[in-house]
């Protein structure tokens, strides 16, 4: 088993940026670098912030931005937060009905009616 990535994009005011998102089932949000958030001109969600736990265990508050985009060909509107690398968390995976195939290192649509964790061993 290795690292799983998913193809996607975020739509900004004047451009669409393509990403290879790290699939992180331990993360909640979609994340992209702050420089990209600024360059895309993403709007903040009014009166919203997210508490993010960093790798060293600290918790930091950050604004949440409106993200409109695509993940493996499926459209979404989701909160986006600043991250060191582009990543997609479990909320969007569940909302779009994806599960993570850890053996083949890909995400795939969950069959209709299937209930379970957002990963497959």
Image (cartoon, helix red, strand yellow):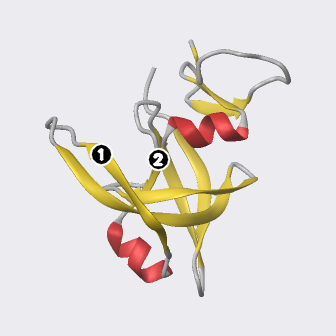
- The residue at the point 54 percent across, 66 percent down is 66
The mark that comes first in sequence, 1 or 2, is 2
Residue 38 position, x and y percent, is 39, 79
Above or below 104: residue 72: below
Residue labelled with disc 2: 29
Residue labelled with disc 1: 52
Q: On the rendered structure, is 62 left or right of 67?
A: left
Q: Disc number at residue 120?
A: none
Front residue (pair 37, 17): 37
Residue 65 position, x and y percent, is 47, 66
Q: Identify the element where label 1 is drawn.
A: strand
- Mark-to-mark CA distance, 1 and 2: 9 Å
Q: Identify the element where label 2 is drawn.
A: loop
Q: How busy is the neighbourhood of tag 1: few (under 14 within 10 Å), some, or many (20 plus)?
A: some
Front residue (pair 103, 75): 75
Residue 20 position, x and y percent, is 52, 53
Quarter of the image that includes the C terminus: top right
Above or below 73: residue 118: above
Q: On the rendered structure, is 90 left or right of 36?
A: right
Q: How busy is the neighbourhood of tag 2: few (under 14 within 10 Å), some, or many (20 plus)?
A: many
- The residue at the point 68 percent across, 58 percent down is 70
Front residue (pair 7, 117): 117
Q: On the rendered structure, is 10 left or right of 33?
A: right
User: Residue lying furthest right in this view?
Assistant: 112
Query: Dots 1 and 2: beta carbons under 8 Å?
Result: yes
Above or below 115: residue 83: below
In which image quadrant can residue 10 be found?
bottom right
């Amino acid at each position: 088993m290795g690292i799983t990535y998913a193809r996607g994009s975020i739509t900004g005011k004047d451009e669409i940026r393509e990403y290879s998102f790290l699939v992180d089932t331990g993360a909640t949000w979609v994340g992209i670098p702050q420089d990209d958030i600024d360059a895309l001109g993403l709007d903040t969600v009014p009166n919203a912030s997210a508490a993010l736990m960093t790798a060293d265990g600290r918790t930091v508050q950050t604004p949440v931005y409106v993200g409109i985009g695509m993940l493996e060909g499926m459209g979404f509107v989701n909160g986006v937060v600043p991250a060191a690398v582009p990543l997609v968390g479990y909320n969007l995976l569940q909302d779009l009905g994806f599960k993570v195939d850890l053996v083949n290192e890909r995400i795939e649509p969950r069959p209709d009616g299937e209930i379970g964790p957002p990963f497959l061993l």
